[in-house]
Structure formats: structure tokens, C-alpha cells
Image: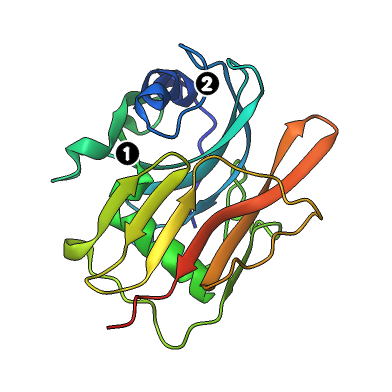
């Protein structure tokens, strides 16, 4: 289980994201984001080396608040071949220098997110060590393990999210970067999907929203 260190970060996560978010094609805010962390959860790295967090941030810099899903990984050294996914670096008060990556470009996050879909791992609370987050829900209606080939994985951003190909000819995992709250409280599995991860966030202190974080689509038929 990952240990949450309550310590200083220089710069902070939100400071890193303030510079990085406007470079994304799915960013919808003003010239400079005005960010607050409003939700998310963690996953454990089986090797205990990589921190994995799927963060929800609220941006109030535009005409209307926007809620983004930002999956991040934290590493003690640069990840070879993932320069395009680097969000920035920070100094952790306990662990020292940390390289922060967009999790869509980190094979450790992808492997654990697929394991979550299959029910092989449990989501962890964002800010509490060794505590399962029972509000994160997942389903998988496919048959057999989800194919994963890190060498063939691709990540493509568009106006709403990130499309991940998990293997050559394999299924597609779509990350919902711009979150939409489900009208009836619980999202339904989209047509043609074989798996999903749903989570919650707080648009305001007294409001709880739930929506799709990730959707798995079957591999195209040959």
C-alpha cells in the first residue's frame, strides 16, 4: 500500500498544473487556470516505486467552472521515452526530487488502471494511507485479460479527452479529461463499451457529483 506523506511540495501540484493545463487541447479555461483540488483517488504501484494519483481539479478561470480529470504519476527519476508526458518536477519534503508525468504516458498507471477495471486491484483514498475508496466504482464485461503492450501503447488527446490504445489491435481506453456529472447520479455504460471507471468530486462544499473517469471500448473487428 502507498504511504501518503503530508509534507511540503515545491512547486505544489496545482502550481505545476497551472502552467501545464493550458497546453492541452482539452483545456477550456481562461489565459491562466484558477485551480482547486476537488476529488480523485490513488492506485498502488506493485513495485512501490511510482506514485499514482487520478486527481480532479476545478478551474474557475472561464465563464463557467470546468472540472478536469488529471491522472498523474510521481517518479524518483525521469521515465525514458516519456518526455512528451512530463508535467514538471518538484521537490518533495520527504522523498526529494520527483518527476511528475501525465499518467496517460506512464505504463505503470495504465497497467494499474486496467487492473482496476478487471477488479484485480482496489482504488485507494486520495489523502489517507492504506484505505480503500469505496466510492470509486468499476465494471468490465469483456472476456479474458485486457491486452496490454507498453511498446505499442499510444495516447492521443482531443477536445474532450485522451484515447489510449493498449496494444496493437487491442481495446481503446478513453480518459474523460473534461468531466460531466451524471444526470441521475450514476453514469451508465456507454453503447459499445465493455468497461468503465466512475468516480466523484465536489463542485461545491455541499454538492457531490459523479461521472465517467474512463471507458474501455472493445478492439475493432478484423
Q: In which quarter of the image is residue 107?
A: bottom left
Regarding residue 122, the answer to whether it shows in the image is no
Q: Which of 136 and 194 is in front in this view?
A: 194
Image location of residue 104, percent across then percent down: 35, 49
The quarter of the rendered structure image containing the C terminus is bottom left
Residues 39 and 191: in front is: 191
- Residue 181 coordinates in the image, percent (x, y): 70, 45
Residue appearing at x 59%, y 44% in the figure: 40
Q: In this view, does 172 lie to the left or right of 189?
A: left
Q: In this view, does 46 lie above or below 92?
A: below
Q: Residues within 10 Å of mark 2 (few under 14, many from 20)?
A: some
Relative side of 9 to 190, left or right: left
Upstream in sequence: badge 1 or badge 2: 2
Secondary structure beneath dot 1 equals strand
Taking the spot 41% from the left edge, 62% from the top edge, the residue there is 173
Image quarter of residue 221: bottom left
In the figure, 144 relative to 65: above or below? Answer: below
Q: Mark 1 and mark 2: span between their CA atoms?
A: 21 Å
Q: Read off the residue under disc 1.
A: 101
The percent position of residue 17, horizontal first and vertical second, equals 43, 25
Mark 1: few/some/many CA within 10 Å (<14, 14-19, 20+):
many
At horizontal 29% and vertical 48% (from top left) the residue drawn is 105
Placement of 216 over or under 147, stated as above or below: above
**According to the image, label 2 marks what residue?**
29
Find the residue positioned furthest to the left: 81
Taking the image as drawn, is residue 40 in sight? yes
User: In the visual, does 96 lie left or right of 137?
Assistant: left
Q: What element carries label 2?
A: loop
Instruction: Choose between 134 and 83: the one closer to the eye.
Output: 83
Q: Residue 130 or 39: which is nearer the viewer?
A: 39
Q: Where is residue 184 in the image (x, y as percent from the top left)?
A: 81, 55
User: Which residue corresponds to the image point at 51% horizontal and 57% vertical from the top-left?
Assistant: 214
Amino acid at each position: 500500500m502507498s504511504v501518503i506523506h503530508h509534507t511540503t511540495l515545491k512547486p505544489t501540484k496545482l502550481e505545476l498544473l497551472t502552467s501545464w493545463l493550458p497546453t492541452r487541447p482539452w483545456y477550456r479555461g481562461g489565459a491562466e487556470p484558477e485551480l482547486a483540488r476537488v476529488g480523485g483517488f490513488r492506485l498502488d504501484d506493485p513495485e512501490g516505486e511510482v506514485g499514482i494519483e487520478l486527481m480532479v481539479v476545478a478551474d474557475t478561470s472561464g465563464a463557467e467552472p470546468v472540472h478536469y480529470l488529471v491522472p498523474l504519476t510521481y517518479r524518483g527519476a525521469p521515465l525514458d521515452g516519456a518526455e512528451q508526458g512530463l508535467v514538471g518536477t518538484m521537490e518533495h519534503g520527504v522523498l526529494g526530487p520527483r518527476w511528475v508525468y501525465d499518467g496517460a504516458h506512464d505504463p505503470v498507471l495504465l497497467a494499474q488502471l486496467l487492473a482496476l477495471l478487471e477488479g484485480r486491484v482496489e482504488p485507494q483514498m486520495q489523502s489517507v494511507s492504506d484505505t480503500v475508496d469505496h466510492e470509486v466504482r468499476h465494471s468490465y464485461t469483456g472476456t479474458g485479460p485486457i491486452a496490454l503492450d507498453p511498446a505499442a501503447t499510444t495516447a492521443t488527446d482531443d477536445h474532450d479527452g485522451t484515447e489510449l490504445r493498449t496494444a496493437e489491435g487491442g481495446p481503446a481506453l478513453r480518459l474523460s479529461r473534461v468531466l460531466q456529472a451524471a444526470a441521475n447520479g450514476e453514469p451508465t455504460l456507454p453503447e459499445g463499451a465493455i468497461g468503465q471507471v466512475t468516480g466523484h468530486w465536489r463542485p461545491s462544499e455541499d454538492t457531490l457529483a459523479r461521472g465517467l473517469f474512463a471507458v474501455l471500448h472493445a478492439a475493432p473487428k478484423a
